[in-house]
Structures are given as structure tokens and as C-alpha cells.
Amino acid sequence: MAVSASEAGTQRGERSFKGLVTITAFGMIVLLVAVIVLLFLDSRGAIEKFGFSFLYTSEWDPVFDNYGAAPYIFGTIVTSLLALLLAMPFAVGGALFISEYAPKTIGSILSFIIELLVAIPSVGFGLWGLFVLAPFMRGTVDPVLRNLIGPIPIIGALFKGPTIGQDLLTASVILAIMILPTILALSREVIAQVPRLQKEGMLALGATDWETLRKAVLPYAWGGIVGAAMLGLARAIGETMAVTMVIGNSSQQISASLFTPGYTIASAIANQFTEADTPMYFSAIVELGLVLLVVSAAFSILARVFVRRINRLPGGGQAQ
């Protein structure tokens, strides 16, 4: 059967578009592999000299070329997870309010204002954190936490020591503020996709608004909310400037106290990259970048596994 000129043109256009998106997809994989290879080659000297001890030792001495990244890894994981813990209740609560309770006009205004936070540059958050948040934490929040929770066994160890305002806790708070609009916006979109009939069916059976949210909305949207949280966590892990300005950057000890000044991997690279004046120092800094990539990949894999398991639960993001 003969194909008309217009149909032939359409088929050529479809094949061209398919080829373009295929090249784009594989191009991203090639780019990622190229970055990994480059980081590995530039960090090879430190990898060969320190091996796995680079990951669990704490000494970082450029004078004698001895390097261990444990405090930086610890600071990255602690600040990122604490930021996620602080941001999630506000993000999910805000998403539920905007989607389910607020009038449409007010919800749109609130969404727009909250999402404007995404447009604020990292250095802007850092300056605000340095001149506003850090003094507030030092003079108000940290002393209250130390006096109220410090005496409690076990958990009190998190809030002991002098309060200086530039520490792991302040870095976690600034990260929580930065990732909150991302989690909120994505959670709101996921919640908005819950079938209307599903909610109306619960209400028709006599359920309250809270029971409808708990049994009809959240089970359906939970997988997407966790995915949004993981995207926020990914941003927190790689954040640099804001964290560098409020975390203290003055301690290489691993301490249970959140009042301890510290480093994250990203802040350590930002602070010390220009000072890497020896081949081994440079190699160690680049290996920090490789470790950061591995940490991010590990959290991404865990997130995918977690989301997949949630989606297999009754109502876990699957249409009923």
C-alpha cells in the first residue's frame, strides 16, 4: 500500500525524534560515566596510598600528607538526615493544607510564595543563616535545648557543649529550609493526583476529614511523598555555600553533640580546593568528590528500594 508524502514525512519525523531522545538518554549515562572516570583518575594517588582507611580515619593533615575523610562523611550524613527530619513534617503538612483544606485562591498564593524560596540562591541563604539564624540559634534555641534535653540520658548527648551558633545543628536547619519548598511542591502535586472518587467514597461512608486523609489520601500518595523527600535529601547532600557559611568549618572530631562545628564533604571541598598545593592533597580533595558521589548514589538506590516497597503496600501509590 502506497504511503502518502505527508505520512512519510510524519514517520521520518517520529524516527528522528525517537533517535534524538535516545541519544539524549544515553548521553546522560555517558556523561555520568565520564565524570566518575575523571574523578577516579584524579584521585588515584590517594586511593592507592590510603585505601579504605580514607573512609574511616579522622586525620586530615596536609603538612604530612595524611588524609582521612570520616569527619566529613559524618557531617554530610548527619546534617542531611537531620534536615530531612526537620523539613518533612512542615512540607507534608503544608502540602495537605494547600491541597485539602485551603480555599483555591489562598492555596495558589501560598504555593507561589513557598516555591519562590527555590529561586533564592544558596549564598543568599548562607548570608541570612550567618547574620540572622546563627545568632538566634546561639542566643535562644541552643541554650533552651541544652537546658531542657541536655540532662536527659542518651538523647541529651546531642545537646551538650558550648553554644556558638555555627555548628551541625544550624547547618541542618538551614538545609531544612532550603529543601522544604522542593518537598512541599512535589508532595502537593502527588496529593492532588489522588482520585476524587476515592476521597468522596470515604466521606460518603461517614469518615471524618482526618480519617479520609489517613486512609484514602496518604496511602495513595505515600510513595510519591517519599520520592519527593529523597529528592530533597539529594539536594541537602550536595549543598555547598549555605552550609559552608554556617557549619563552622573548624573541627575534625566526630562528636555526638550537634553543637560541634564541623564539615560536610561539599564544604570541605569548597574551603580547601584552592589550597591543594601538592599532588597528594589535590588527589585527596578529588577523592572527597568521588566519595560524595558514592554517598549520593547510595541514598538514591535506597530511596528507589524504599519507594518500590511502599508502592507494593495496600494503597501505597497504586490505584484502587
Image (cartoon, helix red, strand yellow):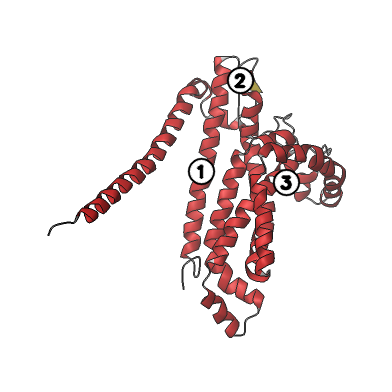
Q: Is residue 22 left or right of residue 172?
A: left
Give the image location of residue 195, x and y in percent: 51, 72
Which numbered disc, 1 or 3, marks the residue that appears first in the sequence?
3
Residue at the image position 39 percent from the left and 35 percent from the top: 30
Q: Is residue 20 left or right of residue 282?
A: left
Give the residue number, with chain letter if any, for mark 3. Answer: 173
Seen from the viewer's position, the closer of residues 27 and 255 is: 27
Give the image location of residue 209, x and y in percent: 65, 76
Seen from the viewer's position, the closer of residues 86 and 103 is: 103
Residue at the image position 53 percent from the left and 46 percent from the top: 299
Viewport quadrant of the N terminus:
bottom left
Q: Amino acid at mark 1?
A: Ala
Asked if the residues shown at circle 2 and circle 1 are in contact, with their CB atoms under 8 angstroms apart, the answer is: no
Q: Is residue 89 visible?
A: no
Q: Amino acid at mark 3?
A: Val
Give the residue number, with chain letter if any, for mark 2. Answer: 66
Q: Could you tell me how far apart the alpha carbons at marks 2 and 1 are, in whole angstroms? A: 26 Å
Q: Nearer the viewer, mark 1 or mark 3?
A: 3
Give the residue number, with chain letter if any, for mark 1. Answer: 298
Number of other residues with Cα within 10 Å of mark 1, as a class: few under 14, some 14 to 19, many 20 or more: few
